[in-house]
Image (cartoon, rainbow, N blue to C red):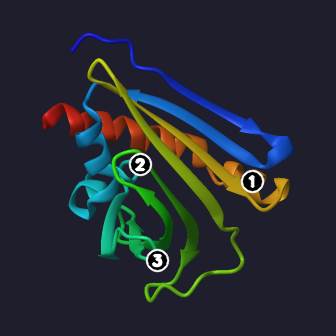
Amino acid sequence: MNVNLMMDFSVDKENATVLVKRTFAAGKDGVWSAWTEPELLDQWWAPRPWKSRTKSMAFKVGGRRLYAMVGPNGEEHWALCDYTAISPKNNFECLDAFCDPEGNINMEFPRSDWNVNFTEESGVTTVDIAIRHENLSDLEMIIEMGFKEGFTMALEHLDELLDRQ
């Protein structure tokens, strides 16, 4: 498919929110599945050379994804996503956090509230993401940790996955 794919990453400091808008040359069903099925998520969620490994996932309101980002030397950084709202194939919301392998939240790092929306037009899917933080210093901490670069790479991996399907 010959389309110009778009990526927009901006920071709304006043509302302590990261806004990401990304288009994919794929239908909404496939893009939705890549965000909501652990075997697909693990293929793209981490920036290389890191890998994502899901320990457990219940994609439902009140459910949770518990996963590790595994580095090239076997190091693990654990995180979770608590699902708070789901409108199938259109939107989901979750609270993200760093944690230990059992899912106990690491309070040294901020949680973030993700609102992820999916729309399709002419076989091209746009994912609009708003990631809200408690305050500006929490948002700045995540940006300083390399969130923009890492998430941009992960979304490029999602492109690759969708191309293979």
- For label 1, the residue is 139
Mark positioned earlier in the residue sequence (3 or 1): 3
Residue at 39%, 72% (x, y): give it: 67
Please state which amino acid type lies under the numbered disc 1. Leu
Foreground disc of the pair 3, 1: 3
Residue sitting farthest toward the front: 87
- In-front residue for pair 44/73: 44
Give residue 124's position: percent from left, percent from top.
Answer: 32, 23
Please state which amino acid type lies under the numbered disc 3. Gly
Foreground disc of the pair 2, 3: 3
How far is the residue under mark 2 from the one under mark 3? 27 Å
Give residue 97's position: percent from left, percent from top.
Answer: 58, 70
- For label 2, the residue is 47
- In-front residue for pair 14/142: 14
Residue at 29%, 36% (x, y): give it: 28
Mark positioned earlier in the residue sequence (2 or 3): 2
- For label 3, the residue is 62
Residue at 23%, 41% (x, y): give it: 30
Tell me, for residue 91, which label it has, or none: none
